[in-house]
Image (cartoon, rainbow, N blue to C red):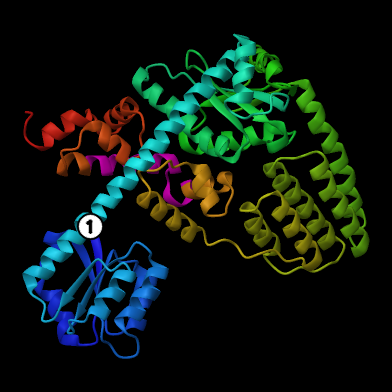
Amino acid sequence: MYKVLIVDDERMIREGMKKVISWNELEIDRVETADSGFEALRLIQAEVPDIMITDISMREMTGLELIEKALEIAPDLQIIVLTGYDSFEYARECLRLRVQDFLLKPIDEDLLTDCIRKQVGQIKEEEQRREMNSMLIRTEGITAQMELEKVMRDLVHGREKEKALDLVEKEFNLRRDMSLMVAVLLPKQDIGVAQQDSAVRFRQIINICLGFLDAKGYGITFADDEESQILIALYVQQCGSEGANVILDLLEILKDEFGDVIKAAIGNEVAGFENIDTSYQDAVYLLQNDKMEIDKILQTQNVLKRSHMFQEVYEELKSAMCANVSDYPYVMRVFDAFCMATRSYNLSEGSVRKYCFELLADVHFSYVMAGGTVEEQSLENFVGSLNGADGEVSLELGKQYLMKMLGGEENDVHEIVGKAKRYINQHLSEDLSVGNIAEILFVSPNYFSRLFKRVTGQGCNEYIVRKRMEKACALLETTNFNTGKIAGMVGYNDTNYFSMTFKKNCGVSPTHYRNKIRGKEN
């Protein structure tokens, strides 16, 4: 459905058009009116209508001035101009401003209806064109992703190494000598769960990994040969030498979505794609020889050693700050050293947030025990501001907290979730993930995932799937589009995957659902 804005300084004309046109038949469910160009611009900014019908001759601001300003706000706005003057100059100016139709008063009801119907048709054609272009881009991207995943599988299993390394460098523009670590994610195999349901969950986990890691340039996610485990080649330089913390953040998101269903291991850092099979074997060995519970991450000794080195530095800096908490200049100098250490050890953003919180909490309580006074709720406020911050912002927030003993205001969590829902509902045909939605909302994926689940009672990925299925049901009920077309319109590039997901959520296949709704099935 679409929105229309009628602009005319004569109330009778505005209300007459609003009442006389059968808007629902034209697929228009909202009609706004404005008595001036200024009011119209306010409504365009707030409501973003699809079509504007405006008079040319108005007080305060002419229709032509309004059109020029309106197109700056909403470049895709379809415009129909009404005028009582059959003027060539008006018509020429309307053409310059990309006005779609130019009608003379008094307006014939049928003529205006046909004109609006034509504009709605043009909007639909443009939407379909954009959807097709988007699908083509996604299809090309999927093909490239599949090729990259095959190359990665060959490398971790030591197959056709030279050919794979050549493709890494020439086809995918990756430095073959970059430092890497391989993480292996092993989804829990639930006895009694249908194979189809397990396959759907496996694909959902991969999609979350792609959104959280690949989309940020942290690494490459791909399924192993038999699709029993998920592999991630982590770029050490991008995600930090503590790649394990990136995987821990990922596991928290997966836990919010699916519960305790993932076990993970991470191999040693290696130099170059040619040695990636070594890191992979490290991780596999840990999984095969450790009896730890699910939802734990196993790390090799080199990874643990590097983590312990920073931990030792951190403990020394924390002790120095807490012991000298009354010496403000000294505490600030030590905190600067802490900031430098997080960068030197190339910590992940999640690690910086974690250590920053622990450090500031200990300093806070040491300061209070030493007789200092702080504003009530200040530590809680600091935690609230820290949750949505990246590494550098976390350090800056920590510095400000030390200087003022006051943190930022807590985020309006319901507003964040509301914005997320609106974005999801408006972009169901596009690639959606916890990672890219969190990026748009300027919060961390881990924080956003927990927040969404706490406020709504369901995981973000679960919500996305439910809304996509609702839209798919509506399309199956009201259109004759085939299953492949509908799959693309609700964000699934793989028709088979869409059908599996639909059957899991709706109980029947898309075709059976349509037949049942239309009475073709008993």
* Residue toward you, 480 or 75: 75
* Residue toward you, 274 or 24: 274
Q: Which residue is mark 1?
A: 1
- Quadrant in the picture for residue 400: bottom right
Q: Is residue 362 left or right of residue 134?
A: right
Disc 1 marks a residue whose amino acid type is Met
Which residue is depicted at the point 87% across and 62% down?
370
Residue 432 painted magenta: no
Main secondary structure found in the magenta portion? helix
Q: Is residue 138 left or right of residue 51?
A: right
Residue 61 higher or lower than 295, as above or below: below
Q: On the rendered image, what quadrant is the N terminus found in?
A: bottom left
- Quadrant in the picture for residue 180: top right
Q: On the rendered image, what quadrant is the C terminus found in?
A: top left
Q: Is residue 228 visible?
A: yes
Where in the figure is residue 204, as x and y percent of width and height?
44, 31
Which residue is depicted at the point 83% across and 37% down?
310
Residue 373 higher or lower than 226, as above or below: below
Where in the figure is residue 359, as x and y percent of width and height?
79, 50
Where in the figure is residue 384, as x and y percent of width and height?
62, 57
Q: Residue furthest top?
A: 159
Residue 465 painted magenta: yes
Q: Is residue 187 visible?
A: no
Q: Is residue 509 left or right of residue 246?
A: left
Write down the region rendered in magenta: 453-473
Residue 252 higher or lower than 268, as above or below: below
Secondary element at image label 1: loop
